[in-house]
Image: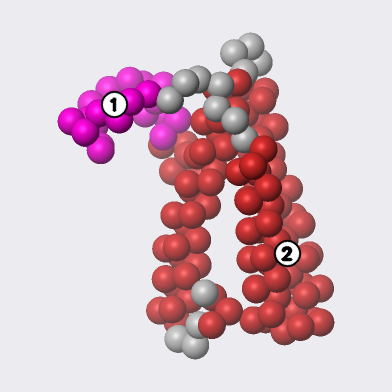
Amino acid sequence: MTSLATEYYQIFLAQGLAFGIGAGAVFTASTVCVGQWFLQRRGLAIGIVTTGSSLAGVIYPIFLDKLIKKVGFPGAIRYTALLMGILLASSCFMIKARLPRQKWNPNTKWFDPLLFKDKPFALYTLGSWLVM
């Protein structure tokens, strides 16, 4: 939606809010899936997965710079969205859960602040929040 924006608040909504929530959801899901598969050397596996975001931070600006020169800003944003959509769709087809699905419990709280009493979980959550 950034490619269609004409006002500052539209760019803020598209990049700041929608992209932030989407990127956080994709990052969290990929980290959780890798954590399910690796019991030994789990930290190494998750470290390799998170390296992908750093690699993308180097590749995407170069990709965008070359595209902006060829097709302009709106076209470059659309091509980038297409590339990300194709990569995300392909990852959805390749991913597989190791653990069986649990039955949905409608009485489960959506947010439980008691989780933050677990120190490792609280530090992980705080670190993830600071990185994003």
Q: Is residue 113 visible?
A: no
Q: Position of residue 36 (x, y in %)?
A: 55, 22
What residue lies at 78% left-to-right and 66% top-to-bottom? 63
What residue lies at 30% left-to-right and 30% top-to-bottom? 104
**As displayed, is residue 27 above or below residue 32?**
below
Residue closest to the eye, 84 or 120: 84
Outermost residue, left side: 107
Crowdedness near tag 1: few (<14), some (14–19) or many (≥20) residues, C-alpha within 10 Å: few
Q: Position of residue 77 (x, y in %)?
A: 65, 73
In magenta, the rendered stretch is: 102-125
Q: Amino acid at mark 1?
A: Leu
**As displayed, is residue 84 above or below residue 2?**
above
**As displayed, is residue 6 above or below residue 31?**
below
**As displayed, is residue 123 above or below residue 56?**
above
Quick one: SS at disc 2?
helix
What residue lies at 44% left-to-right and 43% top-to-bottom? 129
Residue closest to the eye, 119 or 30: 30
Quick one: SS at disc 1?
helix
Of the two numbered discs 1 and 2 on the same chain, state the one appearing first in sequence. Answer: 2
Q: Position of residue 43 (x, y in %)?
A: 61, 22
Q: Amino acid at mark 2?
A: Pro
Disc 1 to disc 2, how far (Cα)? 38 Å
Q: Position of residue 112 (x, y in %)?
A: 24, 32
Judging by the rendered image, the residue that carries numbered circle 1 is: 115
Judging by the rendered image, the residue that carries numbered circle 2 is: 61
